[in-house]
Amino acid sequence: MAANIVEVRTSAISDVFQLAASLREADLSEVCSLGLDPRRAIRENYRNAMLRQSYLVGGELAAMSGLCGSMLGDIGYPYLLTTKLVERVPVTFVRLAREGIKQMLRHKLRLEGHVAADYLGACRLLEVLGFTLGQSEPLGNGQFRKFYMVQ
């Protein structure tokens, strides 16, 4: 498979363990600052998600995203965790992430979550995707910003 060809598919449980072993440093730091074990946190998100997607670059796992939340509620809690491979395809990745957000908004009226305040790349991505970010506030062992988007 060509080095920069991106494929999106439904996540498999094996993706959880592969991703946990190869998270970008900033993603790993964000998860750990919440006091979470990365493997357990990714597995829980995978298990509780109503939508699950894995992004592969050149056939290798580059990211996982999903949407958690009550099936009956209006609020969805998206997640996105990445490896360094997403850096090879930034424009394509943003385009695919936008499509993922559109799909999530078909299921929920509001999307919200928290992002590490010092993870500037993730904060910028969320803004590019159309999320509104709040002020930095303490959460877990770090500073986080709430993000949200309303249909």
Image: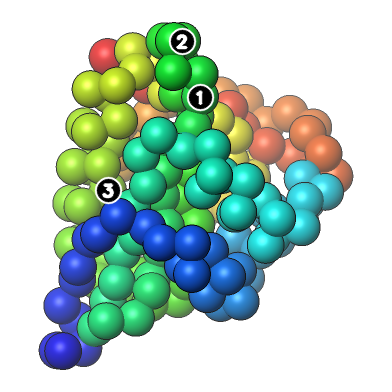
Mark 3 is on which residue type?
Ala
Disc 3 crowd rating (10 Å Cα; few below 14, some 14-19, many 20+) is some
Q: Earlier in the sequence, mark 1 or mark 3?
A: 1
x 77%, y 51%: residue = 36
How far across and how far down the image is residue 7, in percent?
A: 19, 68
How far across and how far down the image is residue 112, in percent?
A: 49, 25
Q: Quadrant of residue 131?
A: top left
| Side of 117 relative to 47 (left or right) | right
Mark 2 is on which residue type?
Gly
The residue that mark 1 highlights is 69
x 69%, y 60%: residue = 38
Q: Quadrant of residue 4?
A: bottom left
The residue that mark 2 highlights is 73
The residue that mark 3 highlights is 97
Marks 2 and 1, how far apart at CA: 7 Å
Question: Between tags 3 and 2, which lies in front?
Answer: 2
Marks 3 and 2, how far apart at CA: 23 Å
